[in-house]
Amino acid sequence: MQLQKFLKGIDYPADKNTLLQRARENGADDNVVRTLEQLPRDRFNSPNDVSEAVGQLR
């Protein structure tokens, strides 16, 4: 999944709502949006934080 492509332009730290909004603005599909909605945290300090949280979902 090209998650970071959909999060391009985000200023970190960011909360989950900000990630969702930016992903939608960047054309994310339902699969990407669902993945972001399921993230176990609400605050992210970097793109790596987001990637780690996505890894915890699997």
Image (tube, grey):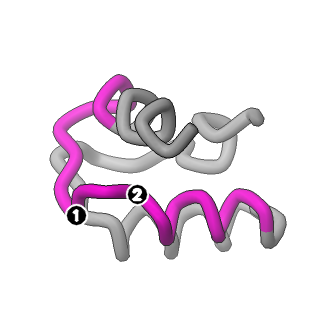
Q: Look at 66% across and 49% down and name the residue there.
A: 6
Q: Position of residue 44 (x, y in %)?
A: 22, 46
What stretch of residues is rendered in magenta? 31-49
Per the rendering, the mark at residue 8 is none
Q: Is residue 52 above or below residue 22?
A: above
Q: Is residue 57 above or below residue 42?
A: above
| Left or right: 19 in relation to 13 | right
Q: Secondary structure at mark 2?
A: loop
Q: Look at 70% across and 58% down and name the residue there.
A: 32
5 or 30: nearer the eye?
30
Which quadrant: the N terminus? top right
Which quadrant: the C terminus? top right
Q: Position of residue 46 (x, y in %)?
A: 27, 32
| Left or right: 23 in relation to 44 | right
Q: Residues within 10 Å of mark 2 (few under 14, many from 20)?
A: some
State if disc 2 and disc 1 touch (CB < 8 Å): yes
Disc 2: which residue: 39
Q: Secondary structure at mark 1?
A: loop
How far apart, in angstroms, are the residues tagged by discs 1 and 2? Answer: 7 Å
Residue 33 in magenta stretch: yes
25 or 19: nearer the eye?
19
The amino acid at mark 2 is Leu
Disc 1: which residue: 42
Q: Is residue 34 above or below residue 14?
A: below
Residue 45 in magenta stretch: yes
Q: Position of residue 51 (x, y in %)?
A: 45, 30
